[in-house]
Amino acid sequence: MSKINTTPVNSKDIFFKYQENMDKMFNNVKRSVPVYHQSTTNVQQEFLQSFENMVNLSIPIQKEFVEKMGITSNIPVPILHVIDNLSEEFVKVTSVQNQIILTIFDAIQQNIKISNDNVKSFTDLNKNILYSWISVFTPKCN
């Protein structure tokens, strides 16, 4: 089987330019990913902090209003248990949800790795087919 002659690196070669520009694009995206990740994390943390502040600031106002109106804020023990149970269940549900999401992300990452391996195998197969065709269609000198 004959091998294709490789062209020396030439800045006018289309494949050299193609590779050079693809490298530029991928490097740009690779630099952007950590910035996007950090920005997303910052927005999530800011949103959570804002919501927590809203709750923490509104509870004392509500309490003061109820006290000034002379309304009792005591509730029966069974209702307290229901509220506590709802909170506990919410924590459990969000914990399970987070585990599911992380498992999904892990599965996606594994599928991308498998896909990448498959692309390499497919490329190797196509390369072998190409070499086979070249050997068949290349004129032989006697």
Image (cartoon, rainbow, N blue to C red):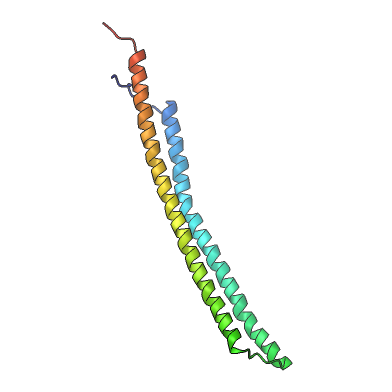
Instruction: Name the residue at 60% across, 72% down.
Output: 51
How many badges with numbers are in the image?
A: 0
Residue 52: x percent and y percent? 57, 75
**Residue sticking out furthest to the left:** 142
117 or 138: nearer the viewer: 117
* Quadrant in the picture for the N terminus: top left
**Residue sticking out furthest to the front:** 78
Note whether residue 22 is visible.
yes
Q: Quadrant of residue 131?
A: top left
Instruction: Name the residue at 45% across, 37% down.
Output: 22
- Against 124, residue 116 (above or below) is below
**Residue sticking out furthest to the right:** 69
Instruction: Name the residue at 49% across, 57% down.
Output: 37
Does 44 sit left or right of 121 as displayed? Answer: right
**Residue sticking out furthest to the top:** 142
Residue 35: x percent and y percent? 49, 55
- Against 78, residue 26 (above or below) is above
130 or 118: nearer the viewer: 118
Residue 134: x percent and y percent? 35, 18
- Against 61, residue 137 (above or below) is above
* Quadrant in the picture for the C terminus: top left
Residue 93: x percent and y percent? 51, 68
Q: Quadrant of residue 86?
A: bottom right
Note whether residue 7 is visible.
no
